[in-house]
Amino acid sequence: MTMLDEGLERSCSRLTERGHGSWYFHCSATNRLGRLERARRGGYPSQAAARRARDEWLATTGEDRTARSWTVERWLRYWLASRTSIRPTTKLHYTRDVERVLIPHLGRLCLADLDARRLRAVFTEIARTTNAKGQPQSASASASAMQHLRTTLRAALNLAVREGVIATNPARHIEVPSYRKPHAKVWTDGRVEEWQRTGERPPVAVWTADQLATFLNAVTDDALFALWWLTALRGLRRGEACGLRWSELDLDHGVLFVVRNRTTAGYQVIEGEPKTAALDRRTVKVLREHRRRQAQHRERRLDAGRVWHDSGYVFVGKEGNPIHPSYASGRFRLLVARAGVPPVRLHGLRHGAASLAHEAGAELKTLQDLLGHSSIVITADTYTSVLPLAQRRCADATAKLVLAADRRTREKSRGNGRRNPRGQRPAKGVPTPARPATGRKPQVTPPTTKTASRSVTTPPWRPRDTHRPHRTDTKKRPPRVSAAQPPLDLACPKRLELPTF
């Protein structure tokens, strides 16, 4: 412990100065992560007060010491360093959120000082800022960025909860603007006219078959024509097309194997799960022509004494190196503008491939395997836009179904009218005459007596006798049979008629 001379504790003339004449303690202990944590605290008026503060600090648990001594900036950097099993693109997005937003707004706070109210205030302040496009973060266009920012902070604090540094995650109670993933919209004639008049375009747009054919005819001589063809017809991702190698193509059998994805997180190649895609004859012909052009370009450069790198990639630059995915996106935007078709993103060709295949009759399970989705819900909800032709077919089929049902109803009504003409129908309220019974057994006719002046089948009414005298015998007596009741009625339940044979 470092302290001033006890004799000067009360007699020093500089005691009124800030920080002068106060007591400090300096000690170290192991924190929750197993590291030696040093602490230096000051500002105590006496030696006894400094000792009490030191003892209190040493008596706390390692979790509490970590939460009180570690800042949010230190914890976020530690969390990023521990994320070793995630994809480089995911880590790149986490790092961008941490370095650009979270550390500038929350970096100086201690983990123990974080609560839901403070985080809500910070996120409200972040929502007032603008993004790279000059739009406020709270706008609908930036709602996804706010959602991702909350996801990043919540994932970092979840690790603190698992490590026992904090008890609960305060980021769970943060409310950000709602965000709904936009669905792809087809460039119909009405949308094209509105875009030409106002310049407004859907966030995710899809070409029709005619518009796609117009674009492909306009870029036939482009060096990356095979890339646009593969993306538009087979639904390859940008990274999958840029990372495709000739060794993963079997043009003789019409099969394509996707085993890598070249992303925009530098030039690092990420090995993913293999995906197989079938190639039609026209696509095989396009790829053979692309390989022939690439071989001719290689020979011309070698004959001129220029450098050529045999990288083995299908889509390469002038020197044979694989193209960067950003170059593919920029080149595609330039060609779309030259072709005079409505604008779509390069990823929009993937949406269009699923929609066109679905319109051609492909099932959702086939589209899921083609696009490489883990769930068929993603394929059905995101990538299958309804094209105008498919809408027209659906409308025609619905109308045809209703008209066929109406036709059957009319024919049935006309058939009933022929069987029951109007002149032969019985009048309302007149009972229908019974048909003569054929093959029935003769009915037993009871003898008529003088006392039975009324109908035998309807006996006179008598009050019901509720008195039941006790019987000594338990043998059931046979039921009484009236003279007008036939013997077969004994076995017939009430309200049922005997069948007629």
Image (cartoon, grey):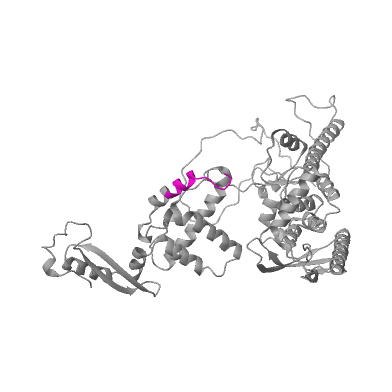
Count of marks overlaid on the render:
0
Against 377, is 387 above or below?
Answer: above
Q: Quick check: can you spot residue 441?
A: no
Against 484, is 331 above or below?
Answer: below
Q: Quick check: can you spot residue 405?
A: yes
The x and y percentages for residue 331 are 75, 53
- Residue shown at 66% from the left, 55% from the top: 378
The x and y percentages for residue 452 are 65, 33
- Looking at the image, which is closer to me, 129 or 7? 7
| Quadrant of residue 243 within the rendered picture | bottom right
Residue 61 shown in magenta: no
Q: Which residues are magenta?
A: 122-133
- Looking at the image, which is closer to me, 399 or 42? 42
Q: Quadrant of the N terminus?
A: bottom left
Residue 125 shown in magenta: yes
Give the side of residue 265 with respect to residue 138, left or right. right
Give the side of residue 2 with respect to residue 333, left or right. left
- Residue shown at 13% from the left, 65% from the top: 9
- Residue shown at 77% from the left, 62% from the top: 317
- Looking at the image, which is closer to me, 139 or 379? 139
The x and y percentages for residue 224 are 80, 57
| Quadrant of residue 422 within the rendered picture | top right
